[in-house]
Image (spheres, rainbow, N blue to C red):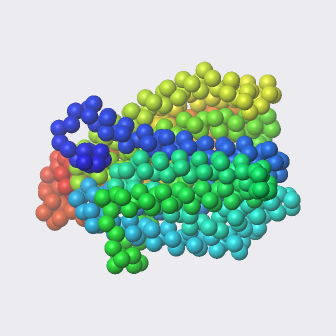
């Protein structure tokens, strides 16, 4: 039996539930680690070429972040609808959704690839880079993103496998792709034997070739997955299913974009504090990102398991698992917080030898340590909301949190009250704590699940006639906010 299927069993004790959660979550945590390692190795090797090349990679990644948000949106829709279908015992429906996801990813990947080919220079130019960086970045961006279909398929193939409850296969594929990328980075950037050094072009080619390997591995794992049964007749554009995927995926992408744009808004205030403070903030943010690996892994587990239970219309169990996963994730993140508090300044020394910057990095990470458990709750419950087919509310909450709470708090605390870097990170923590409380409250008060099917007239009448049933989690009688 698939581990994720066990979530539907009745009478499981808490330790058995925790075991299921960990088996699903830990491969996703490891996958996230290797995804981060890929970016670290790329930056490390490219830094040996020159600062202009590092800048070129940085601006390219800023644009690719938008591409990734779009591909992630497709993946969210596929993952959620497949988990719901399998929870409902409809394997055929799950396979049909998977095929529609592949069609959508292919179309979007091709379109973005064409846009990159035709408008790469103009997109990079918007970021205001120097002519020399523009030339380097355009070549790097086109090589990497013209075959955007590879990125799109990797996202959707991974989501398909997760939708079946398999988090190990995506982990293996990412590890394989990373090993290939690290090897080819070294060989193609610096040259080896008869292969000439290709510099940043080599870095881009390494990225493309590693994604080919990753895509092939994921395709292999999909063919071996017994939960998937593809038919040629289903590889046709289905407007209804495409709309369903978009309705779930678009808000998830909107949440990521709202976060990115919100960062740009309050970054202006941090820049005004001086180069030293801005550098410290950026480095502290890069260090803290490692803690996200854990929370995102548990968020993936929350989407899968809650998705199964919501598909089976077991809303009370879905609520129990959502809260349990969030608590487990928070416990892990307490450990990460302790590491940040104790070793933050020491880790900062790996990035700079400026004593003022190192001190500010330590200050930022000591503050960040205290809101790591709340960050775990935000990320994990966002994954649970996605599994519950509610992707809009997290988007609204993130937008308000980033653009109103965080931006205003950064201005007041860091600029007006002159708290500097401490004010910036207290503001970030305040935003995260508020969002965690709101997300948890709505789960606690049963205002988070969006049932796929409309309730029957009989059930609807029963809900109206007996208000006590409204929160009873029987099929259909659940708040739809």
User: Residue 341: x and y, percent?
Assistant: 59, 23
Is residue 445 visible to the viewer in this orientation of the structure? no
Q: Is residue 95 left or right of residue 356?
A: left
Q: Nearer the viewer, residue 60 or 357?
A: 60
**Quarter-wise, where is residue 80 in the image?**
bottom left
Q: Nearer the viewer, residue 279 or 120?
A: 120
User: Residue 31: x and y, percent?
Assistant: 50, 45
Task: Indicate whether 113 appears above or below 422.
Answer: below
Residue at point 58%, 58% (across, down): 211
Residue at point 36%, 58% (across, down): 224
Residue at point 63%, 51% (across, down): 181
Q: Is residue 386 left or right of residue 59?
A: left
Residue at point 65%, 38% (across, down): 285
Q: Is residue 171 left or right of residue 465?
A: right
Give the residue at the far top of this rendering.
Answer: 342
User: Residue 433: x and y, percent?
Assistant: 50, 36
Task: Indicate whether 159 appears above or below 351.
Answer: below
**Quarter-wise, where is residue 370 in the image?**
top right
């Amino acid at each position: 039996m698939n581990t994720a299927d066990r979530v539907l069993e009745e009478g499981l004790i808490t330790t058995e539930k925790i075991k299921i959660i960990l088996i699903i979550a830990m491969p996703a945590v490891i996958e996230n680690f290797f995804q981060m390692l890929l970016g670290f190795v790329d930056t490390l090797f490219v830094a040996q070429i020159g600062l202009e090349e590092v800048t070129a990679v940085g601006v390219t990644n800023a644009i690719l972040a938008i591409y990734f948000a779009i591909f992630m949106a497709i993946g969210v829709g596929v993952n959620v609808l497949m988990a719901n279908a399998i929870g409902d015992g409809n394997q055929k429906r799950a396979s049909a959704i998977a095929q529609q996801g592949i069609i959508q990813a292919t179309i979007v990947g091709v379109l973005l690839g064409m846009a990159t080919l035709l408008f790469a220079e103009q997109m990079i130019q918007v970021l205001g880079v120097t002519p020399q960086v523009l030339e380097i970045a355009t070549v790097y961006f086109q090589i990497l993103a013209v075959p955007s279909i590879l990125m799109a398929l990797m996202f959707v193939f991974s989501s398909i496998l997760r939708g079946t409850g398999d988090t190990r296969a995506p982990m293996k594929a990412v590890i394989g792709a990373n090993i290939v990328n690290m090897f080819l980075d070294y060989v193609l950037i610096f040259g080896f034997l008869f292969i000439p050094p290709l510099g940043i072009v080599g870095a881009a080619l390494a990225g493309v070739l590693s994604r080919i390997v990753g895509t092939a591995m994921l395709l292999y794992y999909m063919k071996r997955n017994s939960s998937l049964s593809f038919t040629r007749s289903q590889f046709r554009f289905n407007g209804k299913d495409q709309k369903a995927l978009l309705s779930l995926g678009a808000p998830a992408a909107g949440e990521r974009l709202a976060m990115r744009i919100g960062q740009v808004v309050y970054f202006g205030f941090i820049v005004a504090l001086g180069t030293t403070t801005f550098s410290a903030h950026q480095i502290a943010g890069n260090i803290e990102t490692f803690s996200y690996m854990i929370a995102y892994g548990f968020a993936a587990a929350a989407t899968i398991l809650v998705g199964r239970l919501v598909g089976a219309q077991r809303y009370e169990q879905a609520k129990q698992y959502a809260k349990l996963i969030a608590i487990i994730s928070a416990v892990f993140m307490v450990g990460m917080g302790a590491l940040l508090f104790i070793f933050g300044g020491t880790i900062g020394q790996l990035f700079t030898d400026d004593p003022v910057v190192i001190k500010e990095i330590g200050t930022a990470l000591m503050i960040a340590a205290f809101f790591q458990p709340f960050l775990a709750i935000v990320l994990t419950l966002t994954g649970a909301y996605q599994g519950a087919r509610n992707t809009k509310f997290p988007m609204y909450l993130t937008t308000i949190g980033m653009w109103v709470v965080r931006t205003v708090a950064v201005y007041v605390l860091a600029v007006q009250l002159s708290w500097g870097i401490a004010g910036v990170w207290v503001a970030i923590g305040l935003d995260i704590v508020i969002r965690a409380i709101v997300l948890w409250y709505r789960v606690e008060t049963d205002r988070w699940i969006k049932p796929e099917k409309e309730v029957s007239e009989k059930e609807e009448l029963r809900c109206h006639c007996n208000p006590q049933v409204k929160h009873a989690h029987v099929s259909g009688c659940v708040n739809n906010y």
